[in-house]
Image: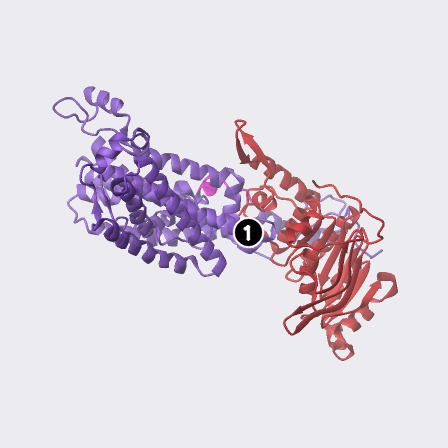
Chain colours: A purple, B red
Amino acid sequence: MASVPAPDARLASDHAPTPQQTATQAAADSSAKAGADERVRDIGPVRRFLGRPEFGSLSGTVLVFLLFAVVAGNSGMFSAEGIVNWGTVAAFLGLIAVGAALLMIGGEFDLSVGSMIGFAGMMLTIPALYWGWPLWLSCLFAFALALGFGALNGVLVIRTGLPSFIVTLAFYFILRGLSLALSILLTGKTIISANESLTLHDLVQADPVFNFLFSGHVLKDLFNSLAQAGVIAARDDGVALAIGVPKVVVWWIVLTLAGAFMLARTRFGNWIIAAGGDPTAAKNVGIPVARVKIVLFMLMALCSTLFAVLQVADAGSAAADRGLQKEFEAIIAAVIGGCLLTGGYGSVIGAALGALIFGVVQIGIGYTSIDNNWYRVFLGLMLLIAVIFNNFIRRRVALGARRGG
Amino acid sequence: MGSIKPPQGGSEYILELDAVSKYFGSVIALKDVTLRLRPGEVHCLLGDNGAGKSTLIKMLAGVYAPDHGEYRVDGAPVHFRSPCDALDRGIATVYQDLALVPLMSVARNFFMGREPRRRLLGVFPVMDHAMAGTLSSEKLAEMGIRVRDADQMVGTMSGGEKQCLAIARAIHFGARVLILDEPTAALGVKQSFNVLRLIDRARARGISVIFITHNVNHAYPIGDTFTLLNRGRSLGTFAHDGISRDEVLDMMAGGAEMQKLMAELEGVRI
C-alpha cells in the first residue's frame, strides 16, 4: 500500500485546531485557516440581497417611480386610469420578457419575437375571418404554428451550432416577410379587422372561452364600487373611468409567477440555469441540454403568441407589422432584470420589473412636459447602467473576490 | 444512492479494456491498449501530453466506443452509447473542467442533473432545496470540506475545493469506479495533497479510482498500480511494489530529459 497520509489526519480546512498540534502544523494551518475564513465569511442579509439578480431592477424600479412621482405626481399618472395605462404597456412587454429572461438564462436569444407577434396575430385572424374557422380553433392554430417555429429555431441552433443570434435573426426576416406576404396573398390586405359580414370584435364576443381568456377586464365591480366610494375617478354615470384590470395584466402576473417558480423551484429550472451557465458541464452530468434549449425557444414563441392574441383581442384587428422592435424591448427588460447576456444567471421577477420600468417610462413621459422621444434615450441609458451594474455586482458579490489558489 | 455495490460476476477486475484501439481518421489515438482495474485499487494512468490519456478516459466514460478490442465491466462486455450508460454502471468521470457551473450554488451544483424532488402541496414536483443544501454540506463534510453555506456560489470556491466537490458528488451518486482526469493539474501543492487524501478516502470506502496525471510525484505515493501510456501505446502496467518512482519517471520521460525533470520535480515532492 502506498505511503498515504492517515485518513484521520486533520484537514487544513478544518476549524478549531487542537492545542496538541505541533508548532509546524499550526503554522501550516494558520495560512489555510485564514483562507477558510475568507471563503466562508458570513455575508449579511444586506450583502445577500445585493447579490440577488433582482437587486438592480428593484432599485431601478424604485428610482423610476420616485422620479415620476416628483415630475408627474399630480398629472394623473398615478390615478387608476394612469396605472392601468402604463400597467398595460408593462404587462404586454412583461409577457415576452418572461420568455426572453428564461431563454437568456438558458444561454440563448430570440430576435424573432417581434416578427413572431405579427405572424401569430395574422395566423389567428386570417383563419377566423377568411376561412370560417371558429375562433378557438384558429387560436390553437396560431399557437401550434408558433410552437413549431419556436422548436425550429431551437433545433436549428442546436443542430448547426450557430449562435442563436444568427438563426433567430434569419427568422426575424422570415417571419416578418411571411406575415406580410401571406396576408397579401390570402386577404389582399396587411391590416385585417373584419370580413364582408363580421368584425373580429363580433367573433371575440361570440366565443365565450376566447372572450373569457383574452378579452376585456377583470375586477370591474371592484373598480365601480371604488368609483362610487369616490376613491377613483368616475364618469358622469357613476361607472369607473378605469374599467378594470386588463386581462393582459392578469396573464403577465400569472406567467411571471409561473416562470419564477419554475426557475427557482423546479428541476427544469435547475436545468435551465445549468444549461446556460455551462452547457458542457450540464451535458456531462446528464442534463438534456438540447431539449432544455428547444423547450425554451418554444416557450418564448408561446409568450410571443400570447402577446399577439391579447393584442388582437384588445385592438380588434391584426396587422402584419405588429410587434416591431419587441425582441429588443424584451431583451432590455430581461437585462435590466439582472439576466446575464452570457446566460446562467438571472431572474424572471427581475425581468417583470424591467418591463414595469419600461412601461412606466414610456407612458410616464407623456404625463410630463418632456418630449416623448426622450424615453428611448432614457431606456438606452437605463440598459447601459443595468448591464454595467449587474456585471459589477456579479463580480463583487455573487462571485466574491477570489484570493489564493 | 451512495452505497457501493460489490462487483458482480466472476471477474477479478471491475473494469477491463482489452487491447483497445481508437482511430480518428488517419490518427492512431490508441493502439492495443490494455488496462485492468481491480476493485478498490487506485490505478494511475500516466503519460505525457498526447499520449492518449484523454481518449482512453473518454472511452472508459462512454464518450467514444473502441474501434477494436473489448471493454468489459464486471467481466461482461459492454457497449456504452453515452456517458449516461457508463454512469448507470457506476463509472463516473470527473473531467478537468469538473462539470461545475460557477454561477450556481454548491447545492445546485451537487445535485445538478439529479435534483432531489418532493411534491409541493402533494401535487407539484419541486426541487427539494432544503434537502439538497443539507445533504450536499454533509457529503462535503464527510470528504473533509467545510461549507458553511450550501447557497454560496461555486465560483467563490478555490480550485481544490471545486475538485473535492466534483469528486464528492461522483461518490455520492454511487460511483464504484471514479475516473479522475488530472485532478491535481491546476492545483497548488497543498491543494493537490488534499485531493490525494480524498482519493485515499475513496479507496478506503472500496471505490476503485483511475487517476490520470502526468505528475509522478502525485501518482506514486497514492497508486497501487501504474499504467504508462506513450504515443497511444501502453508501456505496461506495474504494481506499486514492482517499480520505483524513478523507474516510472524514467519510462514517462525518457533518459535524456530525466535529470532536468528530476531537478524540477524534487521541489514538489510530497
Q: Is residue B107 visible?
A: yes
Q: Is residue A58 visible?
A: no
Snapshot quadrant of residue A166: bottom left
Snapshot quadrant of residue B231: bottom right
Element carrying mark 1: loop
User: Start and end of the magenta stretch?
Assistant: A40-49
Q: Which residue is nearer to you in this view: B198 or A12?
A: B198
Q: Which residue is nearer to you in this view: B267 or A101?
A: A101
Say what amino acid the circle numbered 1 marks.
Val
Badge 1 crowding class, 10 Å Cα cut-off, few under 14, some 14 to 19, many 20 or more, is many
- B262 above or below B85? below
Snapshot quadrant of residue B63: bottom right
Mark 1 lies on residue: B101
x, y (%) of residue B33? 76, 66
Q: Which residue is nearer to you in this view: A41 or A143?
A: A143
Q: Which residue is nearer to you in this view: B203 or A258?
A: A258
- Identify the residue at image location x=19%, y=20%: A228
- For the N terminus of chain B, the image quarter is top right
x, y (%) of residue A331? 36, 50
x, y (%) of residue A330? 34, 48
Q: Indicate the chain on which mark 1 is placed.
A: B
Taking the view exactly as shown, the residue that stands out farthest to the bottom is: B256
x, y (%) of residue A18? 73, 43
Q: Is residue A68 left or right of residue A156?
A: left
The magenta stretch spans residue A387: no
- Identify the residue at image location x=80%, y=44%: B6
- For the C terminus of chain B, the image quarter is bottom right
Taking the view exactly as shown, the residue that stands out farthest to the right is: B242
Question: How many marks do you count on the picture?
Answer: 1
The magenta stretch spans residue A48: yes
